[in-house]
Image (cartoon, rainbow, N blue to C red):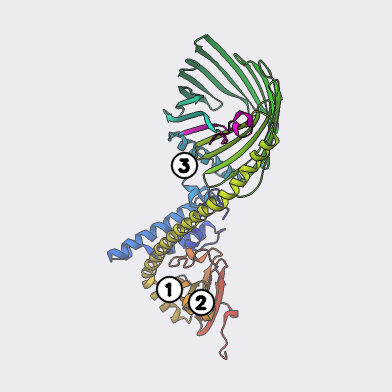
C-alpha cells in the first residue's frame, strides 16, 4: 500500500484484502465469492448463544465494511493509496469518479488542507510575544578612570532597559469572517505605553479578502485602516492598504500598494510603494528552496534608503539546523548580521544572531519560539565596533548552548522519548489483546464450519490441516520465547480449505479471520503440517508470501 501522508495513517490499520483473503488485483467476482463465504460463516442468525451472536455481529460488520469499500471503484482507489484514514476525510462524495491515483492523491491533499483550515477557524489560535531588551554596554564601554577604588565599584552594571509584551487571539464569526483581538504593553527607560487593536478579516471570494483595522493607544493615538488582497492571476497578486492615524499633532494619513509575482517555482518578486510618514519605494527578490533562502532588496525613500542581501542555508538534518547571514547598508550606516537556528524539541526553536553595525555597535539577539509563543532577548553589548565584543557575542552563545544541550536538553529529550516508547508499548499491548480476543471469538464461530469441512475432506481423502503456527520462530534453544511469539492457527486455516485446496494471497496473514499479530514490528512466517490423500506435507512461508497447497514439493518422505 502506498505510504500515507500522515505519520500514523497505517498504524493498527486493518487490511481489507487480508480480511477477505483476496488478491490486491481481485476482480468483483472474486470479492463477491469471498464475501458470501464469510457472510455464511459469521451470519448472526446462525448462532443462538447471546455472546456468540454478539461476536458474530461484530465480525459480520467488519466483513461487510471491507466488501463495501473494495467493491466500489473510487473507495477502493482511495483505500489503496491512503488506507482507512483516507476514507474518513470529508468531501470525497463530491469528487468526480474514475480519477487516476495521481488525481486522487492531489484531491486528498486539497481536502486535507481544507480540513486543516476549518480546524484553524474553530480555534482562538492565541499568539504571544515577550521581548526583553538588555543593556550590557558596561561590559565593554567602561573606562577605568570613571570608577573609584571602592568596594563593588569594579562590577559592570547590566540593566533591562526595554520590555514589550503582546498577545493576540482569533475569534471565528462565520466560515468567511474572523475577528482578531490583540494588544501590547511596552516600557523603555522608565516610560511606558500600550495599545489595543481589533481587526475584522473577511474572505470576499476565492481570489481575495479584506480587513478592517481599529486601534487605540496612548502613544500614537487612534488608528483606522483598511487592507485588501486580490489574486490577479495564478502567478500574481496585489495588496492595497490605507489608514488614518489621529495623533496629538493632527491626522496622519498613509497608503501603500504591493504587487508580487511568481517568477518561477521557488522565486517571488515584490514591488512596494508607501506614502506617509516614511514614504518609500521598495523592490525585493525572494528565492526559497528546500536547502536555502535568499533575499535581495532595494529601498529608496525618506528618510531611509538602503540595499540589503540575506542568505540562509538549511541543513537537511533532524534538528532542522539553519545558518544565516545578511548585510544591509544605507544612509543610516552598515549592519552585518550572522547567526544560527536549531530545533531543540518538538515544539521549540532556538536561534541566536550577532548584529555588528556602524554606528550601531554590537548586539546579540536571542530568540526562543515555543509553539505560538515567542521570546526575544536583544542584548546590546557595545556602541562601538570592538573585536572583543564580536568574539564574545559569537563564542559565548555557542559554549552555553553546547553545555545546556548536553546537560539539559539531551537528557530531557531522551526521557521524553522513553516515555513515548513506553506509551506505545502499552498501546501496542492493548491492541494485541483486543485483536487476540477478536481472533479467539472468530475461532469459536468457526468450530461448526470446520467440523463439517473436516468430515467432507476425510470422506474424499482430501486436505486436513493437522497443525499450523503463525508468528516469529526462533531457535530450538529458546522454546519459551517461541511459544510466546507464535499462535495456533489450525482452525482458521482449515476453515479456508475449499475443494481440498488452500489459497492465501500475498497480503499479511495477520489480517485473516482468526489471526492476529503476536509480535508487532517483527518478521513473521507461517508454518503448517497438513495431510493430503493420506500423506503428510509440511511447508513454511513468509508472512507476505502467497501460498497455494497442496504441492508435491511439500511432501514428507515416509523414510524420513
Residue 136 percent location from the top left of the image? 58, 33
Image height of 443 relative to 298, above or below? below
CB under 8 Å between discs 1 and 2 = no
Specify the farthest residue to the top.
Answer: 250
Disc 3 is placed on an element classified as loop
Q: Mark 1 points at which residue?
A: 491
Specify the farthest residue to the front.
Answer: 149
Q: Is residue 151 magenta?
A: yes
Q: In this view, does 106 lie to the left or right of 308?
A: left
Q: Residues within 10 Å of mark 3 (few under 14, many from 20)?
A: few
Q: Residues within 10 Å of mark 1 (few under 14, many from 20)?
A: many
Marks 1 and 2 sit apart, C-alpha to C-alpha, by: 12 Å
1 or 2: tag closer to the N-terminus: 1
Q: Mark 2 points at which residue?
A: 528
Image height of 21 relative to 205, above or below? below
Q: In this view, does 491 lie to the left or right of 274?
A: left
Q: Residues within 10 Å of mark 2 (few under 14, many from 20)?
A: some
Asked whether residue 101 is in view, the answer is: no
- Give the extent of the magenta segment: 127-156
Which residue is found at the position 56% from the left and 75% from the top? 540
Asked whether residue 385 is in view, the answer is: yes
Q: Which mark is residue 90?
A: 3
Front residue (pair 40, 421) = 421
Front residue (pair 143, 70) = 143
Amino acid at each position: 500500500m502506498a505510504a500515507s501522508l500522515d505519520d500514523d495513517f497505517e498504524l493498527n490499520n486493518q487490511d481489507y484484502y487480508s480480511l477477505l483473503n483476496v488478491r490486491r488485483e481481485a476482480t468483483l467476482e472474486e470479492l463477491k465469492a469471498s464475501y458470501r463465504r464469510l457472510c455464511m460463516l459469521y451470519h448472526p442468525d446462525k448462532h443462538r448463544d447471546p455472546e456468540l451472536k454478539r461476536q458474530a455481529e461484530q465480525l459480520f460488520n467488519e466483513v461487510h465494511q471491507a466488501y463495501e469499500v473494495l467493491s466500489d471503484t473510487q473507495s477502493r482507489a482511495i483505500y489503496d493509496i491512503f488506507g482507512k484514514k483516507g476514507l474518513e476525510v470529508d468531501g470525497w462524495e463530491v469528487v468526480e469518479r474514475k480519477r487516476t491515483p495521481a488525481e486522487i492523491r492531489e484531491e486528498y491533499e486539497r481536502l486535507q488542507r481544507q480540513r486543516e483550515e476549518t480546524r484553524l477557524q474553530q480555534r482562538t489560535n492565541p499568539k504571544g510575544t515577550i521581548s526583553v531588551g538588555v543593556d550590557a554596554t558596561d561590559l565593554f564601554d567602561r573606562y577605568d578612570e570613571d570608577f573609584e577604588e571602592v568596594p563593588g565599584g569594579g562590577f559592570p552594571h547590566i540593566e533591562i532597559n526595554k520590555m514589550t509584551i503582546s498577545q493576540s487571539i482569533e475569534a471565528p464569526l462565520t466560515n468567511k469572517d474572523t475577528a482578531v483581538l490583540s494588544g501590547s504593553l511596552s516600557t523603555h527607560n522608565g516610560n511606558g505605553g500600550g495599545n489595543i487593536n481589533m481587526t475584522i478579516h473577511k474572505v470576499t471570494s476565492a481570489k481575495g479578502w479584506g480587513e478592517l483595522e481599529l486601534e487605540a493607544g496612548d502613544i500614537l493615538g487612534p488608528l483606522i485602516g483598511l487592507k485588501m488582497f486580490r489574486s490577479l492571476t495564478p502567478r500574481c497578486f496585489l495588496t492595497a492598504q490605507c489608514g488614518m492615524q489621529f495623533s496629538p499633532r493632527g491626522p496622519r494619513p498613509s497608503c501603500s500598494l504591493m504587487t508580487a509575482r511568481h517568477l518561477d517555482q521557488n522565486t517571488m518578486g515584490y514591488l512596494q510603494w508607501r506614502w506617509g510618514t516614511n514614504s518609500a519605494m521598495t523592490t525585493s527578490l525572494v528565492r526559497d528552496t528546500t536547502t536555502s533562502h535568499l533575499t535581495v532588496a532595494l529601498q529608496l525613500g525618506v528618510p531611509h534608503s538602503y540595499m540589503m542581501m540575506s542568505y540562509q542555508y538549511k541543513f537537511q538534518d533532524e534538528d532542522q539546523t539553519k545558518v544565516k547571514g545578511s548585510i544591509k547598508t544605507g544612509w543610516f550606516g552598515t549592519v552585518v548580521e550572522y547567526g544560527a537556528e536549531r530545533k531543540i524539541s518538538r515544539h521549540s526553536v532556538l536561534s541566536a544572531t550577532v548584529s555588528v553595525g556602524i554606528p550601531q555597535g554590537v548586539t546579540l539577539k536571542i530568540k526562543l519560539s515555543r509553539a505560538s509563543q515567542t521570546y526575544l532577548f536583544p542584548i546590546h553589548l557595545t556602541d562601538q565596533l570592538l573585536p572583543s565584543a564580536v568574539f564574545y557575542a559569537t563564542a559565548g552563545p555557542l559554549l552555553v548552548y553546547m553545555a545546556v544541550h548536553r546537560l539539559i536538553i539531551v537528557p530531557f529529550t531522551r526521557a521524553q522519548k522513553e516515555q513515548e516508547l513506553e506509551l506505545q508499548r502499552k498501546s501496542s499491548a492493548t491492541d494485541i489483546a483486543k485483536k487476540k480476543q477478536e481472533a479467539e471469538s472468530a475461532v469459536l464461530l468457526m468450530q461448526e464450519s470446520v467440523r463439517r469441512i473436516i468430515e467432507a475432506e476425510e470422506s474424499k481423502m482430501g486436505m486436513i490441516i493437522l497443525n499450523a503456527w503463525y508468528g516469529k520462530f526462533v531457535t530450538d534453544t529458546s522454546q519459551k520465547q517461541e511459544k510466546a511469539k507464535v499462535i495456533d492457527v489450525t482452525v482458521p486455516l482449515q476453515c479456508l480449505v475449499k475443494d481440498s485446496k488452500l489459497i492465501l494471497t500475498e497480503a499479511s496473514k495477520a489480517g485473516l479471520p482468526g489471526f492476529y499479530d503476536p509480535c508487532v514490528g517483527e518478521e513473521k512466517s507461517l508454518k503448517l503440517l497438513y495431510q493430503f490423500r493420506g500423506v503428510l506435507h509440511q511447508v513454511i512461508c513468509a508472512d507476505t508470501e502467497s501460498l497455494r497447497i497442496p504441492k508435491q514439493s511439500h511432501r514428507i518422505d515416509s523414510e524420513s
